[in-house]
Amino acid sequence: MTIQEFLEALQHTQAVGYRPYMMSKPYGQAIRLMSPAGAEHCPITAVCEHYTGQTLPPTAVYSALDRLGLSPDDAYTIAAAADVQASEPVLRTQILHALRLQEA
């Protein structure tokens, strides 16, 4: 899965009931999604759950990458963009746009 394919898959999670939100962390605002079942996810684990049916905690990014066919470099880049506002600003903007979120 490429980053572009990931962004398209992420956008589709809302159509099936995942709710995106911003979570305050000591280092800034992290992008998270709540599954229809009420589980908290980072963007990668939300896409993984939706496409594979396997629920992983938000910290299990590297367990999800093989299931999604993401490269470790792409998974790290996506996770960094979702967790830190200053890291990967272009990709963070793309993730926010895919989820129709705005920075606080």
Image (cartoon, grey):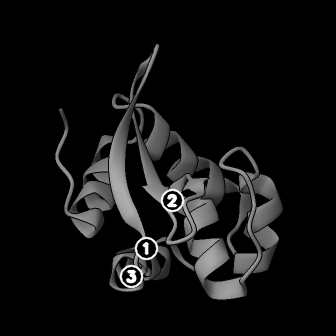
Is 60 above or below relative to 65?
above
| 71 with respect to 13 (left or right) | right
Give, as a three-letter code, the residue at label 2: Pro
Residue that carries the numbered disc 1 in the rendered image: 10
Tell me the element at label 2: helix
Tell me the element at label 3: helix
Mark 3 vs mark 2: in front: 2
Question: Residue at point 42% right, 33% down?
Answer: 87
| 1 with respect to 63 (left or right) | left
Q: Considering only order in the chain, which callout, 2 or 3, is on the residue closer to the N terminus?
A: 3
Tell me the element at label 1: helix
Question: Residue at point 38% right, 82% down?
Answer: 8
Q: Mark on residue 48?
A: none
> For the residue carrying disc 1, how many other residues have a C-alpha within 10 Å: few (<14), some (14-19), or many (20+)?
many
Asked whether the beta carbons under mark 3 and mark 1 sit within 8 Å of each other, the answer is: yes
Is 18 above or below relative to 12?
above
